[in-house]
Amino acid sequence: MNIFEKTWLFFTQDGAWAGTGGIWQRVAEHLGYSGLILICAAVIAVPIGLLVGHTGRGENAVVAVTGALRSLPTLGLLTLFALWLGLGLTAPVLALVILAISPLLAGVYSGIAAVDRVTVDAARAQGMTESQILFRVELPLALPLIFGGIRNAALQVIATVTIMAYINLGGLGRYLIDGLAVRDYPRMVASVILVAALALIVDLILSLIQRAVTPATSKELS
Amino acid sequence: MTSLNRRRFFGLAGVSASALALSACGISGETAFGSGSTDGTVVIGSADFTESQIIVEIYAAALKKRGFTAETRPAIGAREAFIGALEEGAVGVVPDYTGNLLLFLDTSATAVTAEEILSSLKDALPEELSVLEPAPAENKDSMVVTSETASSLGLRSMADLSAHPELKLGAPPEFAERSYGLPGLKSKYGFEPAEFSPINDGGGPLTVQALLDDDVQVVDLFSTDPAISRNNLVILEDPGNNFIAQQVVPVVNGKLVSVAAADVLNEVSALLTTEDLVALNDRVSGEEKANVATAAGDWVEEKFPS
């Protein structure tokens, strides 16, 4: 029996999907962690991105910081934070929020900054306030790029949430880490397939939402 | 990282060489080697982790102290590699751990006590190899608690755990499934922890921190981990031999090691304790970052008579 047949067996065995430690539970955990991380990262990244994109101040800092955050090894951060904060959700969520901030911030900032200045000036000439300009003109026009950032962040987070199983948490990484520990390679292959499938499905859903909420004008522009 | 490698290393049950295992061909333990004379140089190889290198440097320093010529071949690799090197005669001596060596040679071995393992080893080893006297020093998985937990719950042995099902246990993920892990604790001691926390750093700093933070109350650490003495932790006794014996033992190619040199190694084994290994690991991997040869040389200087 080759590894693919054994992997198939993993998916079809009794109790593979339902129940404690089953695939559905792991998928739910995986999505829960990912959602929590994306929301935390968005709370930090979106206001900063809007502000910097709108005012044009601090662009260099944003570019430098997002670049630097991108280069931090997430597993190293996870270990560092877990040594500081102990086991539990906080340490890995913090490590992954740092991972997710970078694409979100880049998307929001560049989306706003890329809006044609002539359009912004026209809005200002009509007497719109700065916040009206930001939320009624710049933000809708920036949505395609912002959504690009969200999809990028979601993909990275869903793929990397697997490392939360390095400590005592769940998610689909459990199969990967536990499988490696006992050299159960079919279980690891199954984990990889599930994570990839989940990432693709989430990306597909996000792209549909993107299509639904993006204004017609900017669809033509993009 | 060292402990992660070690864990991986121990896990390598790998290829069984039992097909080669003949009945040790007249080599009756101790030092009765073939008549082939040696040129006096003993070549000692080590596995690819720090503790093995420390033991190798101890062997070398002890032999030199008695006027032998000794050379070291550090970090040959995992067990497959260094047993192969011994059989080929590239090295004459390699230190190993009795339990894991036996499981490597015979994956179906069932011996658990130090004596059983030693006598099974003699049958399982290939013809040209034999083991000398094992040391009291052992490096094996151990159930460890803080001294506060030990005193407040009155824990001395793993048998005491069954009265405390509220305890949480932290260990590498494989502990959930291996026979010495949760299944062994349940069948040998009737202990099922309230929660099992898989921590994937092979008994490293995260595991120790989780114990100190009281996230878990019992953890699986290696018995020679300096973190045990540094944090005043308590190793629970294992009367039911859940974790099989892992005594440090020199594995030798009889054609390459003289009886006199083997006697020296036997003397080293008689003196080497688990506490010594803990202290040596601490000097090399801890704050001091001592050179392996220096730390080993100091031990020989202090403990080994000339």
Image: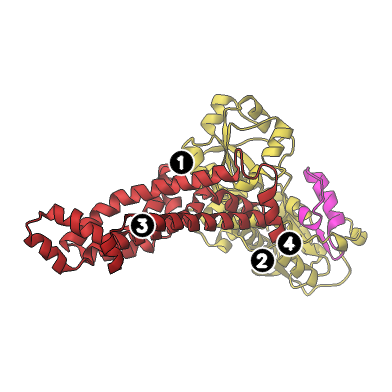
Chain colours: A red, B yellow
Residue that sits furthest to the front in the current view: A216
Cα separation between marks 3 and 4: 41 Å
| Residue A101 x/y as whole percent | 34, 56
- Which label number is shown at residue B77? 2
Q: Are marks 2 and 1 on the same chain?
A: no
| Residue A9 x/y as whole percent | 70, 52
- Which label number is shown at residue A210? 3
Residue visible at 80% across and 60% down?
Answer: B16
Residue visible at 73% across and 56% down?
Answer: B13
- Which label number is shown at residue B138? none
Depth check, front residue: B16 or A139: A139
| Residue A187 x/y as whole percent | 64, 53
Which is in the foreground here, disc 3 or disc 4?
A: 3
Circle 3 crowding by C-alpha within 10 Å: few under 14, some 14–19, many from 20: some
Q: Are marks 3 and 2 on the same chain?
A: no
Q: Are marks 4 and 2 in contact (CB under 8 Å)?
A: no
Examine the rendering and report whether any part of residue A121 can be seen.
Answer: yes
| Residue A197 x/y as whole percent | 54, 57
Which is in the foreground here, disc 4 or disc 2?
A: 4
Q: Chain of mark 1?
A: A
Q: Please report the bounds of the magenta region as a residue range.
A: B103-131
Above or below, B173 relative to B78 = above
SS state under label 3: helix
In this rendering, would B92 be left or right of A216?
right
Q: Chain of mark 2?
A: B
Q: Are marks 1 and 4 in contact (CB under 8 Å)?
A: no
Residue that sits furthest to the bottom in the current view: B39
Residue visible at 81% across and 73% down?
Answer: B38
Residue wearing tag 4: A2
Sequence order check: which comes first, mark 3 or mark 1?
1
Sequence order check: which comes first, mark 3 or mark 4?
4
Cα separation between marks 3 and 2: 53 Å
